[in-house]
Amino acid sequence: MEQYKLYRTILCIDLKSFYASVECALLGLDPFETPLVVADASRGGGSIVLAVTPYLKRLGMPSRCRIHELPEDIPIIFQKPRMELYLEYSAKIIEIYLKFISEDDLYVYSVDEAFLDITEYLNYYQKTDIEIAKMILDTIYNETKLFATCGIGPNMLISKLALDIESKKAPDFIAKWTYDDIPEKLWPVSPLCEMWGIGRHMEFNLNRLGLHTIGDIAHYDPKTLKKIYGILGEELYYHTHGIDMSLIQSKKAVRAISKSYGNGQTLFHDYFPPDIFQIILEMVDDVTRRLRLHKKVAKTLHLGIGYSKETGGGFSRQITLDQPTANASVIYQNCMFLFHKYYENEPIRRVQISVTNLLENHIYQFSIFEDADLMQKEEKLHYAVDEIKFRYGKNSVNRASSEFESSTIKARNKMIGGHHA
């Protein structure tokens, strides 16, 4: 396995409780001593809490819950989500990273997390990896008053594992792992979903195989894992040994392969057919607009439906389209196919739509069952609507059905990422 090991110096930096920490920074408060949550209290007790401060996490409060689940014996400070502000702070942090390294050595993983390859900068700065990490974290705090944590490793995976498993509990918020640390620090980890890349569904299936710690997977037969899970099973086996050959410098190629567009929303009351179809159509419009904007087409469609809390359950299914498309009607029709096939007549509170397996836009091959003229006119109409929205705002033109009481599109168009701008 030695031949698969990379020996780079990778930093994985995460901003602690990002949204809540931004709000504390602006109020001049210490997030480690302040009971602050980011949530829109005006939307009722069912509104989702987007972030809580480290102080509240220390008291056992989860990062994601609903307002009515918050303890009543703590004088909690509510701050309304301000997504545009958080994006501005994220951009500031990226600018800080670029003061230390080049853009080629930076991979922005999310709004609050990034990977930095500092291999070639150790000699340049004449500092150790830990010293460079501390220098960057100190700069972030001095310029933004935000606290950051850092994992250091010889590849992207190990740096991420060091971040998630150890750095957030370290006194200086920095943890460094090597390949030699994997048996001692990674293999005892349980439950399995504590490891990056293992979701609860996969954890459930692995538990059924008798695998309850990461070490159990590391010592399991890799051929059996591959037989059950395909290439993902083989990748999981290597990951449990700390093996990851991803390079930050090839991040653009990785992004092109893994890119997806999605849209999800939690509804404020129970929905049933046909009202839920309105929500699905509006979400399809948003996803296909993003496909057109980036000149992409999608081959795979995913639809997730979550039932109300009282009922529980739901379904999550995907379908491979006959050919890649960005056509709203085609994608909506396939959403309806999945919906009618798996829906169980329960009240709906959550809808998720995403498209994957993206390719560059290409000429669509119409089947003999499709009205080519109608579909081409529809595409021209969508592009015209896109242009109007771009010039005059998202709510400048909508479907007539946006006037229905069941519609949420006008309210959501005033938000960024589903939250107030």
Image (tube, rainbow, N blue to C red):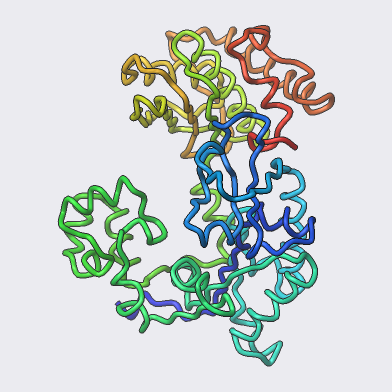
- From the image, which quarter does the C terminus lie in? top right
Q: Eyeballing the image, is 66 above or below 184?
A: above
Q: Residue furthest front?
A: 73
Residue closer to the observer: 368 or 107: 107
Residue 67 in the image: state x and y as whole percent: 56, 38
Left or right of residue 327, residue 323 in this image: left
Quadrant in the picture for the N terminus = bottom left
Q: Observer-nearest residue: 170 or 104?
A: 170
At 33% from the left and 80% from the top, the residue drawn is 2
Is residue 60 toward the left or the right of residue 36 in the image? left
The x, y position of residue 328, in whole percent, is: 56, 20
Who's the residue at 53% across and 38% down the image?
66
Numbered-mark total: 0
Is 183 placed above or below 55 here?
below
The picture places residue 69, in percent across and down from the top left corner, at 50, 40
Give the image quarter of residue 322: top left
Name the residue at 59% across, 81% down: 119
Give 39 or 368, whichever is nearer the viewer.
39
Residue 394, relative to residue 94: is it above or below? above
**Which residue is depicted at the point 21% across and 53% down?**
207
